[in-house]
Structure formats: C-alpha cells, structure tokens
Image (cartoon, helix red, strand yellow):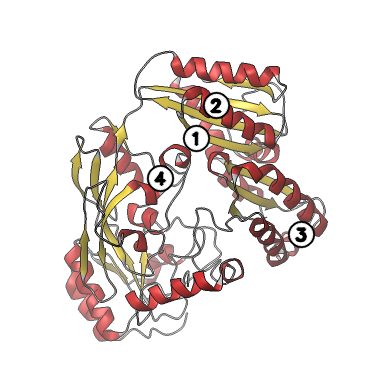
Amino acid sequence: MTACSVPATVIDRIREIVGPGGYIDNSDDLAPYLEERRGRYFGAVPILVRPKTVNQVSNVVSVCAEAGTPIVPQGGNTGLMGGAVPHDTGSEILLSLTRLNCIRDIDPINNTITVEGGCVLSDVQSAAASVNRLFPLSLAAEGSCQIGGNLSTNAGGINVLRYGSARDLALGLEVVLPNGQVWDGLRRLRKDNTGYDLKQLFIGAEGTLGIITAAVLRLFPSPRETQTAFIAVQGIQEACDLLDQMQVRSNGMVDAFELISDTALDLVLTHMPQTANPLTNSHPWYVLTSLSASSQGQALKIALEETLSSAHELGNIHDAVVATSMEQGRALWRLRESIPEAERRDGASIKHDISVPISQIADFMAQAEASIQAEVARVRLVAFGHLGDGNIHFNLACPVGMDANKFLACGDDLNRVVNDIVSSFDGSISAEHGVGRSKRGEIRRHKSEIEMDIMERIKIAVDPNSLMNPGKVV
C-alpha cells in the first residue's frame, strides 16, 4: 500500500467531528471495506468515517472540500462495478452511512416512507410491512445493501416490471453536496412542476455528485393474493409471448418474470445444497413468475391457469408447477436467487449486465451466443434475469477443462463482442449494476459524444474539483 497522502490535520479534524465509534483507522478493521465483493478491485485509505447525523456528514465533507481531499461514499459495498471501492493511492477517505440508519417517517395515507441513506433495504421493507404497505424494491443483496447505495446506483431487482427501478420509487432526496452544503429536497409530492427535477441528478450518479443522506420513497398496498409459477418454455421467444399473454390476462398484475437457462439452473442444483428441480425433466429454458393483487379472490389464479393452459396447447411451454403455499413459492425463488452464488462456487466467469428491448431479446441471445462460441469454443452460457424489463445477465462460465486464467484473459475480447452486439440492438451495456470503475472506459464507446459531454459538464458544474468518488462513471 502506498503511503497516506491525506494530511494528518484533516484526519484529526474528521476524528473530532464524528467522535469515538465514528471512524475506523486500524488496517485490519479497514480491510473488509477496501475490497469489491468479487475480489476484482482493492483500495487503500487512512480512515473510514461513519457519521451518525447529516450535520456530521456535512462537516466532514466541508473539511475535505477545504483541504482538497477526495471522498468515496460507500453503502453496503454490495456493488459489482468497483464504484464503492477507493483507489490504492491512500489519498482518499471512505465515508460510510452505516450509522445514519433511522426511519424518519412513515405516512401510510400518503403512501410514503422517509428513511436515511444507511438504512438496509430489508429493514425498509419491514418498516413498510408494519403499516400494511409494500416497498417493492427487491434484490438478492437486500439483507445488506443500503438505500443510499440503491439510489446512487439506481438499483433494479426483480420487481422493475411492475413498480420500476429505484429511480421510479423516489419522490425526494436529501443530499450533501461536494462543498458540504445540504440540499433538502425531501418532498413527498407526486406532482411538483417547478423546474428541473434535481433529485434525478443524484440517482444513478454513484456518489459522483453528492452523498444521498435521506430519501422519501413510494409505498404501495400490501398484496393479499400471490401466485408463483415455475415454467419450462419452448424457447426465449415463446417466453416473451408468454409474458405478453400473462400481462393481458392478469390486467398487468405480473410483478416479476425471470428467465433462467438450463446451465444456470444446473449450476444451482450442483453447487447449492438442498435444491431440486421442481419439474420432472430438464429443459433448455425456464421462466419464474409472480403475480400479486391487493385483494383476495380467484382472479389471479384463474388468469395464471388460463395463460398456462393456452400456452401449453400452442406448444409454447413443456411443463409448469404452480406454488400451492408461501413456502413452496419461496423455494422456487431460492432457485433464482442462488444463481450468483452458484456461479461463484463454480469458478471463473465473465459477466455482462445488459438490456435490450423485450421484443428483440431472442434475436440478441441467438446472435450473441453464436459470436462468443466462435471466440471461445465450448464456453458455457449462464443466462438469467429480468426478462420482463429486458435485462438479462448474460454470463459466460469457463469451458470444462480450460485453464481459468486463460479463460479470464479473454475477458476484454468477449466483453467487446457482447457489448457491440448490445449496441447494435440499441441496448444498454449496464442495465442495473452501474458503471463504477469497471465500465467507465467502455461507456465512451457506446454513448454519443453529446451524451458524454453533457455528463461531464454536469460533473464539473456540481463538483468542480472532482472530489466526489473520483475516477468513477465519468
């Protein structure tokens, strides 16, 4: 690790602001915060500061702004693009909102909840459930990721199809700006047409424009009826057709519609104990779907059964199982949620988080698979994800018998092949994981000069000294 270049006076002032328990400066204790969860990025800082109040965040940022010391905001450190990991220069400080974790207000009549940036996502979900409301943002890391990070990366997850991403679930924000000023935009309004929608600048900016310290989030009535099904489909196009029919018959009540390849399911069955294929036979492609309604009755069940029956008659699906209990439904979802961990246990993989229009997913998949097979023979396609919103995790597992390092050395070439095909379909090379350090250079190949110029001008206007999460996104 390089020598610390943060002035000792800055570190002393930060310690004084946050007090005992508000910082970590022991190298052993710092280590877990300095590594990306997949082990691809490592950093070094002299101190991790953990403010307990917005005023403390503001004061810390002011001290750093005065000294020209860069700040790397970090939530639950569950991101995959290196956006929350500092560089290895030792010239930055790491700022965590872990202790800024209060539920400030729940308003069930207005269907809003106001939470601080360090609140863990699952705690927000539980707080909403305590007043018979649903906060629909849901992803595999919800037991450790934090709301500030969810908003900063515009997190997606399984329910985007019906409820939208984090961007769609936020009504207002509180943000500490790069100069230490606090912007209080915690409005609980659905309609506010008084100029620029400033909150959208900070959502998805990955901490490069400011630190989200609190947010007003949308709530929804808690579902009283849920139907979950695991379906073997003929192919990807048939899965897309099934989604369309299910949306029509259920009157838009589909919460999630997940595509799972046979390779992805096989990894789960191989590496994750106490899992089993819920269907009798193996099939090339599967769909996991959930529908819900705020009132009880038979309408959802009938819509699901009619859709499956019609699709079976057309030969679009081979088999299906409908959960008959909440526990069975959770077991089906565990298969989907276990895929990333099964990939990790399996070994080397090259991952892509892409999106294309739903109507073009089948064509994209066929073209992309053929192209990567031409690059690396016998590569295993581990495709899964949010078919309902066009977001597929197009991951590549090392061919059996191939040296892992040799396979990973092909990463840049394979990434370029996949990303170029995504762009040819007018898609996105990062649907929900963000840019961070990993794709900072690559987005310049896939965004227009005008887009990049606008982003860079915004960065300069809000953070002229580039002290907020430097070297990320732009």
x, y percent for residue 161: 48, 39
Assess disc 3: are there few (<14), some (14-19) or many (≥20) residues with their C-alpha within 10 Å of its C-alpha: few
Mark earlier in primary sequence (3, 2): 2
Are circles 1 and 4 on residues that touch, CB within 8 Å?
no
| Residue at the disc numbered 1 | 256
Q: CA distance from mark 3 to mark 4?
A: 34 Å
Question: Where 221 sits versus 364, above or below?
Answer: above
Q: Which mark is residue 246?
A: 2
- Quarter of the figure with residue 351: bottom right
| Residue at the disc numbered 4 | 142
Mark earlier in primary sequence (3, 4): 4
| Residue at the disc numbered 3 | 403
Left or right: where does residue 227 sit relative to residue 137?
right
User: For the point 46% across and 65% down, which residue is it?
Assistant: 83
Q: CA distance from mark 2 to mark 1?
A: 11 Å
State how many labels appear.
4
x, y percent for residue 393: 60, 48
Q: CA distance from mark 2 to mark 4?
A: 27 Å
Question: Where 207 sits versus 317, above or below?
Answer: below
x, y percent for residue 163: 41, 40
User: Callout 2: helix, strand or loop?
Assistant: helix
Q: Is residue 40 visible?
A: yes
Camera-nearest residue between 241 and 27: 241
Mark earlier in primary sequence (2, 4): 4
Of marks 2 and 1, the one in the foreground:
2
Question: Where 229 sits versus 429, above or below?
Answer: above
Of marks 3 and 4, the one in the foreground:
4
Mark earlier in primary sequence (1, 4): 4
Q: Is residue 324 visible?
A: no
Question: Where 385 sits versus 36, above or below?
Answer: above
Q: Amino acid at mark 2?
A: Met
